[in-house]
Image (tube, rainbow, N blue to C red):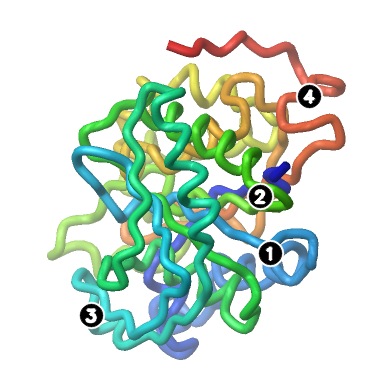
Amino acid sequence: MGEIVGAGLLAHVPTIVLPEADRLELNEGKEITLVTGLRELRRDVFERDDYDTVVVLDSHWATTVEFVVTAQQRRAGLFTSEELPRGMCRMPYDFPGDPELARSVEKFADKHGTWITAIDDEYLPIYYATINLWKFLGEGLPDKRWVTIGVCQTGDMEDHLRLGRALADGIAATPGRRVLLIASGALSHTFWPLRELRDHEASDPVHIRTPEAREADHERIAWFKEGRHDKVLDTMDAFWKFRPEARFFHYLMLAGALGERACAAPARQYGEYENSIGTGQAHLWFDRPADGWTGTGTSAPRTPHSRH
């Protein structure tokens, strides 16, 4: 039986893969803590031997008529971003996939009333929400398998929770799998306009697009640290006003896999809450509690979650 042994909500902003000199120039001579945070997370979690597969829930990969999970034996090549080719250009990547796990997840689509297809096409595009985190957390660890699942642009909150439920079942049905989940994406996500954004490239949160968005991000970070996933889920209508990246679907898939409102796992933060040209960014990691993802031994009572 497979299991989820850790999970994270992690930032993938392009600045983390820029040369150090460029990062310092953009950030008033200081290193951005999103970089140092990922280095610490790698040492604490990703260099351990107690997992074999990483599943990235990629906020940049938007499908339309179904969820797609990568099923290649191996993915390798050079990545240049169509969005920011000057900063992310010909980046090499090479890692094994996990087709057995991908096809296991696909099998649980009907059970959860959704549509999931495992795709092993070697020409399937890859996105920097996966690549940038692999560069920090996976490169140099050649035996660790990486799989990506995209958000579905025609789906809603319930659809993405259903994907998460199917993902958890698919992992459980794959013998011996020990999996880390990454929800790759931002919190509030409104950029400064082009003619203004170069005045707001430093990481200081004062540059977040609005004070209200900054406050909404801080509120949710505090809830995550308290293990109150129920509060985050129950206030999604309010958070959507601040345009979280991909409507926060990357997190909703993660929540669906971890038990939704019953999830009791508190976050620890790596690095600081930082700005990226108006958007709110943070690295939050959830260790599996000793009594499981939905354990309530030391946490507040949870509202039962529905299975529509």
Q: Position of residue 123 (x, y in %)?
A: 25, 72
User: Is tag 1's residue or tag 2's residue first in the polypeptide sequence?
Assistant: 1
Which is closer to the viewer, label 4 or label 1? 4
Circles 3 and 2 in contact, beta carbons < 8 Å: no
Q: Which residue is mark 3?
A: 85
Q: At x 46% / y 53%, what residue is drawn? A: 184
Cα separation between marks 4 and 3: 45 Å
Quadrant where the N terminus sits is top right
Cα separation between marks 2 and 4: 17 Å
Tell whether 68 sits left or right of 167.
Answer: left
Is residue 216 visible in the rendered image? The answer is no
Circles 1 and 3 in contact, beta carbons < 8 Å: no
Cα separation between marks 3 and 2: 29 Å
Q: At x 44% / y 88%, what residue is drawn? A: 19
Local crowd size for mark 1, using a 10 Å CA cut-off: few (<14), some (14–19), many (≥20): many
The amino acid beneath tag 2 is Trp
The amino acid beneath tag 4 is Gly
Q: Position of residue 56 (x, y in %)?
A: 49, 55
The disc label shown at residue 285, or none:
2
The disc label shown at residue 240, or none:
none
Q: Which residue is mark 1?
A: 41
Q: At x 64% / y 53%, what residue is drawn? A: 180
User: Is tag 2's residue or tag 4's residue first in the polypeptide sequence?
Assistant: 2
The amino acid beneath tag 3 is Pro
